[in-house]
Amino acid sequence: MGSLVGLLVPAGLLSLSLFMHILSCALYNNWWPLIAWLLYALMLLPLAVLMREGESAFEPGSAAAKHWSLFVLSTLITLVIGVPITLWHVDVIESGPVFLNFSGFVLLVATGAAGVLLGGGEEDSWGS
């Protein structure tokens, strides 16, 4: 039962996060807030580097890769928060999509936290 909860809770939070982003665009008939999805897609690369660094922490040069991936990841997170505020400031979008985008971002962070807390302790062997 715990394995099922560890799978369903992050999946539900992720789908709710994506729904909030689409809702922020559809309710106000302005599709500019979907720029956040591009930034989310770009976040996968530094996250992949950070996940790989856990395996090769003692190889030479791995500290530089870790620091650069943390820098790029923090820059992208700042952009996820800052781009909707900037679009609102220059009157491209209204304040409603900004708050819906932020709620989608918070749900995405909650998805990551739920994935780590609920499913991170298990060893996945992928069938072996």
Image (tube, helix red, strand yellow):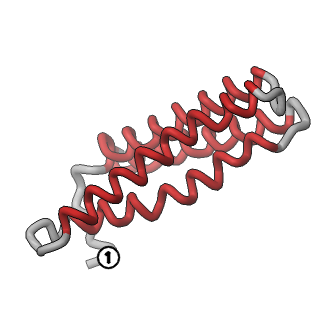
Task: Name the quadrant containing residue 52.
Answer: bottom left
Residue drawn at (81%, 30%), measured in percent from left and top?
93
Tell which residue pokes out farthest to the top in this image. 95
Residue drawn at (47%, 44%), measured in percent from left and top?
10
Which x, y percent locates residue 50?
30, 60
* 15 shown above or below 66: above
Residue drawn at (85%, 37%), measured in percent from left and top?
26
Tell which residue pokes out farthest to the right in this image. 29
The tally of labels here is 1
Is 33 positioned to the left or the right of 71 in the image?
right
Residue 9 seen from this side: no
Q: Residue beneath label 1, please?
A: 127
Quadrant location, the N terminus: top left
Along the line of sight, which residue is nearer the eye, 88 or 49? 88
Is 7 positioned to the left or the right of 105 in the image?
left
* 5 shown above or below 56: above
Which x, y percent locates residue 85?
66, 28
Quadrant location, the C terminus: bottom left
Q: Amino acid at mark 1?
A: Gly
* 34 shown above or below 90: below
Secondary element at image label 1:
loop
Residue 100 seen from this side: yes
Along the line of sight, which residue is nearer the eye, 68 or 80? 68
Is 119 positioned to the left or the right of 81 in the image?
left
Along the line of sight, which residue is nearer the eye, 69 or 23? 69
Is 90 positioned to the left or the right of 37 in the image?
right
Residue drawn at (86%, 31%), measured in percent from left and top?
27
Task: Name the quadrant containing residue 66.
Answer: bottom left
